[in-house]
Image (cartoon, rainbow, N blue to C red):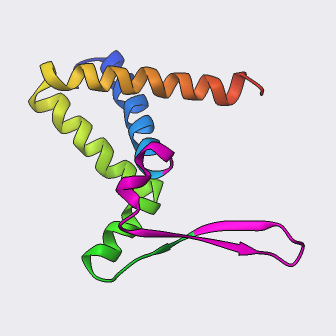
Amino acid sequence: MGNWLDLCLLVFASFRLTRLIVYDTITEFLRAPFHDMVEETLEDGSTETYIEIKGEGLKYWIGELLSCHWCTGIWATSFLYAGYALIPQLSMPVITVLAIAGIASVIQHYFIKD
């Protein structure tokens, strides 16, 4: 690990990449082959949406992975760290952009009330 700034960049980049993969609408196309969105009407008339994992074997495993932020976070962090360690000149711009977006997301969530 290079220094504290690099560690902070990797932490926020990992956070943002994980959220991007697991939750963001823009990456639904990645999850769609592995997830079905199910909408259920509750007794009080409200609706609840949840995912059902498709398939079995490897397809099911990938679906589980993509629905779990803890699991996806390990792989996203490993991917970012490998890039940082092996090809820093290519990965640091991506890590930096993801980190800035991650910090902005935290600021938006905790400090800006809509």
Q: For residue 82: magenta? A: no
Viewer-proximal residue among 64 and 33: 33
Q: Which quadrant of the figure has residue 45? A: bottom right
User: Which image quarter: residue 61?
Assistant: bottom left
Question: Which residue is the extreme one toward the right?
Answer: 44
- Is residue 113 found left or right of 24 in the rendered image? right
Asked if residue 29 lies in the magenta stretch, the reply is yes
Residue 41 location in percent, x, y? 77, 74
Residue farthest along the left direction in this orientation: 86
Instruction: Give coordinates of residue 15: x percent, y percent.
Output: 44, 37
Quadrant of the snapshot with the C terminus:
top right
Q: Residue at x 36, y 21 (%)?
A: 97
Query: In the image, is residue 43 above or below residue 5?
Result: below
Query: What residue appears at the point 44 percent right and 20 percent down from the top-left corner?
Result: 100
Q: Which residues are magenta?
A: 23-50
In the rendered structure, the answer to whether residue 2 lies left or right of residue 18 reads: left
How many numbered discs, if any?
0
- Image height check: is 91 above or below 43? above
Q: Is residue 111 left or right of residue 51?
A: right
Q: Quadrant of residue 91?
A: top left
Q: Is residue 79 above or below residue 109?
A: below
User: Residue 1 placed where, x, y %?
Assistant: 22, 26
Residue plotted at (48% across, 28% down): 102
Comparing 102 with 54, the one in front is: 54
Determine the residue positioned at 17% across, 33% down.
83
Q: Farthest residue to the bottom: give it.
A: 56
